[in-house]
């Protein structure tokens, strides 16, 4: 039975660069158990903890804005849950905020709209003007044919509608730092490394997610739904 949903925000630092998506999910499951939270489980032959991450983060990337939802069978104060679970997370995962979300509100994946990144690429012999020209060409393109490979499957798609903005921020030593705003919906998601490839630039040496933007449910609606759940 689900009586409460808590939405945690957390950072993923360089200490966790080796963690894969499933490792991060497992870390949250273990932390919730260690914190003594009454996590709700799915029905069926193999009940699973109802813990949902907003979006996979590519292995080797860092972030300051990850989001995870945890459904609970017993109510708890969000601040207390945050303090308890923060002590149980492994090095590299740092929970820093928690708030309550209506149990019947859309899933965190369905609410996700876009992601913002900082990406460092080797400068090589390129000038800032070269990078700006590459960005201008990409943003002025009507389409950007691309493909996504996973094991033996290949999916072709148009990358251009998924790129909302790209900017050159500055030069950092031997690298250029780019800012990217990319669509991150369930069925329409762009990866930062795909955009770097489309720009014709070398493989990034750093990918850092700055922000995940959700289509938030207004507080008044959350309160209305909660009142209905409590009846």
Image (spheres, rainbow, N blue to C red):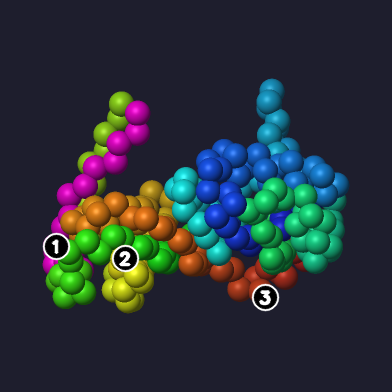
- In which quadrant is the N terminus drawn? top right
Closer to the camera in the image, 101 or 97: 97
Q: How crowded is mark 2: few (under 14 residues within 10 Å), some or many (20 or more)?
A: some
The residue beneath circle 3 is: 220
Lower position in the chain sequence, tag 3 or tag 1? 1
Q: How crowded is mark 3: few (under 14 residues within 10 Å), some or many (20 or more)?
A: few
Q: Residue at x 17, y 64 (%)?
A: 125
Q: Which residue is drawn at 36% across and 71% down?
A: 172
The residue beneath circle 1 is: 142
- Secondary structure of the residue carrying numbered label 1: loop
Residue 187: image location, x then y, percent: 38, 49
Q: Residue 175 shows which numbered tag?
A: 2
Q: In this view, does 42 lie to the left or right of 74?
A: left
Closer to the camera: disc 3 or disc 1? 1
Q: What stretch is highlighted in magenta?
A: 134-151
| Residue 111 appears in the rendering | no
Q: Residues within 10 Å of mark 1 (few under 14, many from 20)?
A: few
Lower position in the chain sequence, tag 1 or tag 2? 1
């Amino acid at each position: 039975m689900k009586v409460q949903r808590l939405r945690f925000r957390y950072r993923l630092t360089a200490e966790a660069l080796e963690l894969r998506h499933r490792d991060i999910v497992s870390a949250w499951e273990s932390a919730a158990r260690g914190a003594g939270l009454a996590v709700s489980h799915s029905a069926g032959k193999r009940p699973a903890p109802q813990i949902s991450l907003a979006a996979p983060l590519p292995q080797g990337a860092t972030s300051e804005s990850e989001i995870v939802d945890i459904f609970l069978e017993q109510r708890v104060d969000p601040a207390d849950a945050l303090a308890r679970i923060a002590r149980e997370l492994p090095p590299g995962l740092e929970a820093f905020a928690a708030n309550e979300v209506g149990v019947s509100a859309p899933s965190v994946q369905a609410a996700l709209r876009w992601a913002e990144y900082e990406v460092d690429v080797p400068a090589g012999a390129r000038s800032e003007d070269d990078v700006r020209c590459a960005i201008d060409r990409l943003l002025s393109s009507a389409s950007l044919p691309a493909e996504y490979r996973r094991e033996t499957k290949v999916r072709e798609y148009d990358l251009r509608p998924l790129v909302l903005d790209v900017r050159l921020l500055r030069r950092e030593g031997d690298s250029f730092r780019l800012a990217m705003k990319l669509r991150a919906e369930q069925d329409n998601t762009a990866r930062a490394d795909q955009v770097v490839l489309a720009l014709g630039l070398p493989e990034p040496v750093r990918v850092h997610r700055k922000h995940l933007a959700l289509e938030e449910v207004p507080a008044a609606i959350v309160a209305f739904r909660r009142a209905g759940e409590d009846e």
